[in-house]
Amino acid sequence: MSADDRITAQMAFLSEADRLKSVLRATTLGDGSRQENSAEHSWHVALYALVLGEHAPEGVDVSRVIRMLLLHDLVEIDAGDAPIFGTHDAAALAAREAEAATRLFGLLPGDQGTDLRALWDEFEANATPDARFAKSLDRYQAPNQNLAAGGGSWLSYNVGYDTVLSRVGSKIADGAPVLWNWLQPRVAAFFDRLH
């Protein structure tokens, strides 16, 4: 593949990635003014990794985590966002996301598409220390946004503390226990104030 063809393929991928800016999430911005989009979320959670990487379990490669987080939601261009407190068919969603990953990473030159797809697959499998930390940060960002926004999607979806613990807290604790230990009492205090 010539350099010109390689850049053309890379630009096709980057142009398609721009569509992620149009995918709205259930989570609002911290000021509660509007829903965040998936591109904003991806940038923000990658920044979380950069800033909070020192709290990762030993052996985590934060630069790989940042790359995973920049890529992790690209599939939402085709598959849409599936809010954690919403109801959806997990198997059907996973199939749509895998199909989207094949299409999107297939836009890139073969070697680059293969490498980036492997990072996405690793994130999805959640089986390596890097993926577990990345997945934990992905779950960690939204509760912090909800706290800043006075409840955000927790109120929209009418969820309680136990639901947050089971759907979010356990996932954060799996790969970022130090961060969950910091966040958990703040989440508990928020829900205590509601009663």
Image (cartoon, helix red, strand yellow):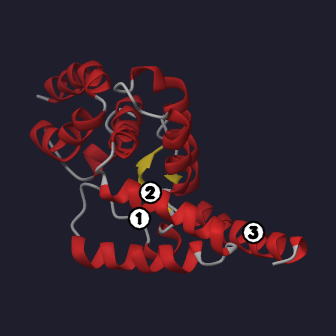
x 50%, y 78%: residue: 102
Using the numbered discs, state the Cα–Cα distance from disc 3 to disc 1 in whole angstroms.
Answer: 24 Å
Q: Secondary structure at mark 1?
A: loop
Quarter occupied by the C terminus: top left
Q: Which mark is residue 81?
A: 1
Residue position for label 2: 25
x 14%, y 24%: residue: 192
Q: Is residue 46 above or below residue 104?
A: above
Q: Secondary structure at mark 2?
A: strand
Choose mark 3 or mark 1, whichever is in front.
Answer: 3
Q: Is residue 77 above or below residue 122?
A: below
Q: Are marks 1 and 2 in contact (CB under 8 Å)?
A: yes
Disc 3 packing (10 Å; few <14; some 14–19; many ≥20): some
Q: Secondary structure at mark 3?
A: helix
Q: Which mark is residue 10?
A: 3
Say what amino acid the circle numbered 1 marks. Asp
